[in-house]
Structure formats: C-alpha cells, structure tokens
Image: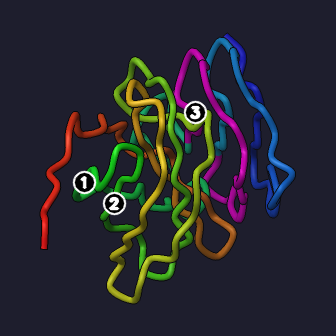
Amino acid sequence: SQQGIKILNSAKGTKVGASGKGNTIMSNGSSGIWIYGVDTDTHTIIYNSITANGGLGIDLGGVGVGLLDGSNDIMAIPVLTSVTRLTINDHRVIGTATPGANVQIFTDPGDASGYGEGRDYLDCVLADGSGNFENTVTICDKSLKISFTATKDGNTSEFSISSDLPPSYTVINT
C-alpha cells in the first residue's frame, strides 16, 4: 500500500495546498498524507481535496487514528459538538479545537474508519481562546458527511470523526 504523500524523519515546514490552490489527493492504497517522526513538524495541510484513500486522509505518526508519535506536534483533532440544519441547505456547526486553531470544514462520502476525509472544502473558522468554534455552511448533498481539520502554528491535525447531517429541520415562526 502506498501513501499519496509521505513526510518523514525530522522534515520541517512542508506546505501542502494554499488558499485557492489546493491539491487533489485521492485513491491511494494507504493514507492520503502520512507524516511520521517525532521531530517531523510544522506541516501545513490546507485547502486540499483528500478523499477515497485506503487509509486515513491525514495520518500523523502511526497507522491509524490517534496512534500519534509526536508528528506535527501532536495537533489535536477537532471535535464536533453539534450540527443543526437551519434551512434546506444551511447547517450550523459547533465544536471544539485547539484554542486559536484555524478549523477547516469539509464534506466527504465517508471513510471506513469512521474518521473523515475531505473531498469538498467548505469554509474555515478560527477557534476562540477557549477552543470553541461555530460556523454556518451550505451543504446541498445530504448523503455526505461533515469532517474537520485544525491547523495552528503550521501544524495540521488528522481529520475528525465523520458526522452525518441531520435529516430535517424545524421552522420556528416568530
């Protein structure tokens, strides 16, 4: 099995993607991006489409979720607290991440691990000083799952757990 991109052995400062210039990283036999090594950090992975890989979309350290070895300063995975359907296509997402982290929001058909990949970049939001974030995003395809990454000080996390979108919403007349 092959990773799409390997960043190994004390490498520092790699940037994969940039605003308006993301890459497509897909259909690899293993992880889309594999970052391995205790001193392997400050690798920024932003604005990419990472999907349909045999392993995790982004794997920090081990082979699997949370088997971290110190890669990318063990950047914490964001946690979705709630997703609320506001209108037919608009959803409010609320969660937690490392305080001050830039949280990227994605949709994807889903990954067998239960942890997301990110085929479609939607938006980004800054986690506040307590690590809380909230944003409203438009998602037209309700069969997709939502997932997140967090980036701070040049270090990007693995993808969060994939979450289903709520099937319906309530209209409140005021």
Residue type, numbered disc 3: Gly
Which residue carries the number 2 mark? 92
> Residue 83 location, x and y as percent?
27, 52
Q: Residue at x 27, y 50 (%)?
A: 85
Contact flag, marks 1 and 2 (Cβ < 8 Å): yes
> Residue 167 location, x and y as percent?
22, 34
The Cα–Cα distance between marks 3 and 2, rounded to whole angstroms, is 24 Å
Q: Residue at x 34, y 59 (%)?
A: 93
Q: Provide the secondary structure element on which disc 2 rests.
A: strand
Label 2 CA crowd tier, 10 Å (few <14, some 14–19, many 20+): some
Residue 138: within the magenta?
no
Which residue carries the number 1 mark? 84
Q: Provide the secondary structure element on which disc 1 rests.
A: strand
Q: How is the image coloured?
A: rainbow
Mark 3 or mark 2: which comes first in sequence?
3
- Rendered-image quadrant of the C terminus: bottom left
Mark 1 or mark 3: which comes first in sequence?
3
- What residue range appears in magenta? 37-59
Q: Nearer the viewer, mark 3 or mark 2?
A: 2
Residue type, numbered disc 2: Arg
Residue type, numbered disc 1: Thr
Q: Which mark is residue 57?
A: 3
Q: Provide the secondary structure element on which disc 3 rests.
A: loop
Q: Is residue 107 left or right of residue 11?
A: left
- In the image, 154 versus 143, the foreground residue is 143
Q: Nearer the viewer, mark 1 or mark 3?
A: 1
Label 1 CA crowd tier, 10 Å (few <14, some 14–19, many 20+): some
Q: Is residue 6 left or right of residue 55?
A: right
Q: Residue at x 41, y 45 (%)?
A: 89
Q: Residue at x 44, y 23 (%)?
A: 111
Q: Is residue 17 above or below residue 92?
A: above
What is the chief secondary structure element of the magenta stretch? loop
